[in-house]
Amino acid sequence: MASGNLWALFKSVTEQPATLMATVLARNGSTYDVEYIGGNISQVSYGGSNAFEIGSKVFVQDNKITGQAPELPFTEIEV
């Protein structure tokens, strides 16, 4: 069992910004236009040296690209 303040431990885990997956639509220098799964479009920054191709999947956290996301197949199952 963890010792110390459990509330502080919980807050340290939950206060991190969410990591979202998006598709690259366009590149404008060091910024990218991306589309999230829900259809929202935003402009995000990337400070790394690798360029992402249009149509590739990326991870976005706090309006910054954090890395390449895997190209996984999408399957919809009706229940």
Image (spheres, rainbow, N blue to C red):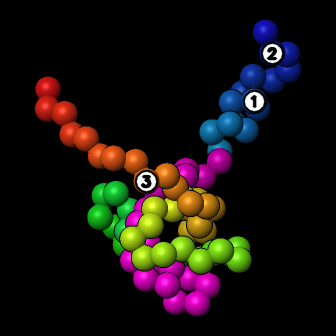
Q: Main secondary structure of the magenta part?
A: strand
Going by the numbered disc 1, the residue's amino acid type is: Leu
Closer to the camera in the image, 31 or 40: 31
Q: Are marks 2 and 1 in contact (CB under 8 Å)?
A: yes
Residue 58 visible from this viewpoint: yes
Q: Are marks 3 and 2 in contact (CB under 8 Å)?
A: no
* SS category of the residue bearing label 3: loop
- Relative image position of residue 49 (x, y in whole percent): 71, 77
In the image, the segment drawn in magenta is 16-33
In which quadrant will I find the C terminus? top left
Do the residues under discs 1 and 3 have CB atoms within 8 angstroms? no
Instruction: Measuring from the top left, give residue 78's x and y in whole percent.
Output: 14, 32
Is 20 included in the stretch rendered in magenta?
yes
Q: For residue 68, what is the image quadrant?
A: bottom right
Q: Is residue 77 left or right of residue 58?
A: left
Which label sits on residue 50?
A: none
Residue 7 is left or right of residue 19, and the answer is: right
1 or 41: nearer the viewer: 41
The answer to which quarter of the image holds residue 52 is bottom right
Q: CA distance from mark 1 to mark 3?
A: 34 Å
Mark 3 → mark 2, Cα distance in angstroms = 37 Å
Where residue 24 sits: x, y (%)? 43, 72
Front position among marks 3 and 2: 3
Relative to residue 76, is residue 56 depicted above or below?
below
**Residue under numbered circle 3:** 71
Residue tagged 1: 9
Pointer 2: what residue? 2
Q: Helix or strand or loop: what does disc 2 sit on?
A: loop
The residue sitting at the right extreme is 4
Amino acid type at mark 3: Glu
